[in-house]
Image (tube, rainbow, N blue to C red):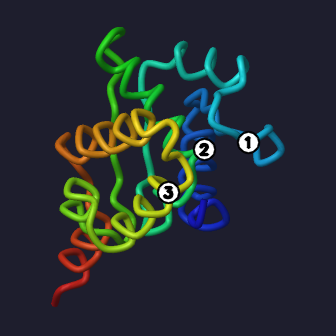
Amino acid sequence: MDTRKSFTDHLYTALQRKGILTFRDDEELERGIYISPELSKAIEGSRFAIIILSRNYVSSTWCLVELTKIIKCMKEMGMKVLPVFYDVDPSDVRKQTGTFEKAFIDHEECFKENIDLVKTWRAALTEVANLSDWHLQDRQQKQFKP
């Protein structure tokens, strides 16, 4: 993910310092279209999920698989999901425009034999974009206005 070495690391460290038990997927975990049992268990055992949506988020099938699992837990187990829109407009996520549109063109080609999977990813993104959001770009602009 394009925020791992910046925003995500800072957020993870801040949560740890506050004593909040935090799980972050390991870069070394095997990537694919299925979630490892370890990651699946961690997601299911969580009360909250913070999703950092960036311009390149949708390029990662791994991120989309995790998102689908998180949305399922939100619906079935009442998990609270907090989306953070990191330098991306929430409407681009909701409507899958901009970099999201291009990535989905690629996903539809790559997964044309399993197009229902791509539809599931699209629905999960729309759903998370419709949740109350924290749009980092907007917050920074408002915060620093004289």
Mark closer to the chain start, 1 or 2: 1
- Name the image quarter holding the N terminus: bottom right
Counting every numbered tag in the picture gives: 3
Q: Disc 3 residue type?
A: Glu
User: What's the amino acid at mark 2?
Assistant: Trp
Give the residue type at disc 1.
Arg
Quarter-of-image position of residue 118: top left
Q: Please determine whether, in this image, residue 12 is positioned above or below residue 97.
A: above
Which percent across, then down, holds residue 87?
37, 72
Q: Which mark is residue 62?
A: 2
Q: Nearer the viewer, mark 1 or mark 3?
A: 3
Q: Pinpoint residue 64: horizontal percent, then vertical percent.
A: 49, 43
Determine whether 100 is above or below 134 in the image. Answer: below
Residue 124 drawn above or below residue 107: above
Residue occupying the point 57% across, 48% down: 61
- Pointer 3: what residue? 109
Q: Name the spot of residue 145 as percent of width and height, x first.
A: 18, 86
Residue toward you, 94 or 16: 94
Dot 1: few (<14), some (14–19), or many (≥20) neighbours within 10 Å?
some
- Which quadrant is home to the C terminus? bottom left
Sequence-wise first label, 3 or 2? 2
> In the image, 9: left or right of 133?
right
Which mark is drawn over residue 9?
none
Q: Which mark is residue 31?
A: 1
At numbered mark 1, what does the secondary structure look like: helix, strand or loop? loop
In the image, 96: left or right of 77? left
- C-alpha separation, residue under disc 1 versus residue under disc 3: 19 Å
Cα distance between the residues tagged 3 and 2 = 17 Å
C-alpha span from label 1 to label 2: 6 Å
